[in-house]
Amino acid sequence: MYVSEKNIVLSGVAVITYLVLEVFSGLYFLSCAGVALFVAVTIKFIRDIGHHIGIRDVIAFIATLQWIIGPVMAYHLLPEHELYFMSVPEKTYMNYVVPGCLAFVAAMYLPLSRRNTIGQKALNTLEEFVQDRKSLGYILIGAGIAFSFLARFVPGSLAFLFFLLSNMQFAGLFIILFADRTVNKWIVFAGVLGAMTLNSIALGMFHELIIWYLFTFLILAVILELGHGIKILLFTAGLLALLLIQSIKQEYREKTWYSVSNKSNTEIFQEILLDRLINPAKLFEPEVVSNAGARLNQGWIISRVMEHIPEKQSFAKGETIKQAFYASILPRFLAPGKATAGGQDNFERFTGLQLRGGTSMNISIIGEAYGNYGIWGGMVFMLLLGLVYNLVLIAVVHLSNKNPTLILWVPLLFFQVIKAETDFAIVINHLVKSAIMIWLVFWFSRRILKVNM
């Protein structure tokens, strides 16, 4: 984010939002500031869709949504959830999270370089570069599908590597979407996303599907040059689709995971989906809205950390951060005792709650920052983390001068980073390992296949 007429207007909207809420809502002043930040981030996100691949916008939108808006709703709008309730007063929570989130977002947008976004210049260079490299896209899709199949047979220590390699199919898809100007690209598009959709339905797991749909939307918006009206319409449709999936997910899993049926998973999913479409009022039933609000609200976990530390557990003083760095450098077969992605150890240590077997929850980076360094140290950590993300994206933009397709690997590079619920071990492990994998793919393409990417 930089000084321009558009961003001055955006700042004005944020200030007006804050003043209106401060005067008329009765919210705590930092809650008002947090909502104003969310409004500004959301407007910028929608405004810039189609003009650049806004990874910063995605991160900021999801973070403010789950760390601020979800908790505001929990404090003031939604009935208190039986399990997922806020454990500290609103003032205590917002005094830490809003300044920490603001520092994080501001640091990500600091204009540390003249070329700090994946903007029109990089996209034009990419489009010209890939015109005679359509075959590269098909190779990457084929390789990704092959690794996805082989992932079923590899030991657990290699599972994450094969997960990364399988997702190169999306880099291949994005190359084809830019390079191919025939109807064939839409057939490939439908095939890749259709296969992933069916696989997600079969497994009853939709998180990865949603993220890849989001990234694909950002790419298509650039290619199709969508207007503001269409962007707002699709953005709203996406939010409704998330609510639809949330309303379906629990019933679907109960019928496929915990009971026996002579129907296929796809048939069961179609029946539940059709029921929701015929009876849309079910999307807004109290239980569905409550569960959706709880799923949106990462603040209940963060507040539990703040209630538990330092009253019942001392600050970690950087211990889990150091462990995460160590774990990100060494592969699991060389360090079998390293930090485990999934967050169970950190969750139980920082919240004092015990997770049932198979349940995965994370305390989020901002929660972990507090658990290690307290309020002020946590804010500083979030500022530094925002700078790191900023510098990584700037590095990608500069490296794309010689490797134009590198910008299409950013969704894979930031796949775990954009999530607001993940802890630092998951984020840094994914960022480091995916960067190494992407470098190896580019090296292999250049040295072995003799194709510059």
Image (cartoon, rainbow, N blue to C red):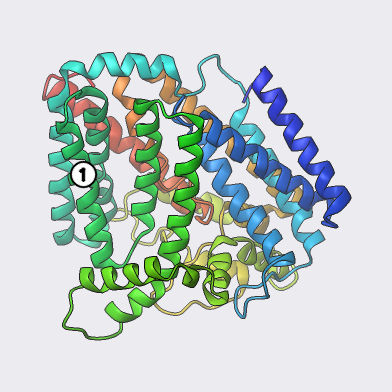
How far across and down, in percent of the image, does residue 424 sit?
51, 51
> Quick one: 279 or 283, which is closer to the camera?
279
Q: Which is more toward the observer, 431 or 109? A: 109
Disc 1 is placed on an element classified as helix
Give the total of numbered labels.
1
Does residue 405 appear to the left or right of 296 in the view shown? left
Left or right of 268? Residue 102 is: right
Q: Quadrant of residue 83?
A: bottom right
Point out residue 418 in the picture as x, y percentages from the top left corner: 48, 45
Residue at position x 51%, y 39% in the image: 232
Q: Quarter of the image for the N terminus: give it.
A: top right
- In the rendered image, the residue lying farthest to the right is 23
Can residue 197 be seen here? The reply is yes
Q: Is residue 424 above or below residue 263?
A: above
Residue holding disc 1: 190
Residue 3 visible? The answer is no
Residue 174's place in the image compared with 127, above or below, is below
Task: Say which of 208 and 422 sits in front.
Answer: 208
At x 47%, y 36%, the residue is 231
Label 1 Cα crowd, 10 Å radius (few <14 / some 14-19 / many 20+): few
Left/right placement of residue 101 relative to residue 169 reads right
Query: Considering only vertical position in the picture, is 66 above or below 379?
Result: below
Position of 140 relative to 302 (above/below): above
Amino acid marked by disc 1: Ala
- Identify which residue is drawn at 70% across, 66% down: 77
On the image, the x and y values in percent for residue 224 come to 35, 27
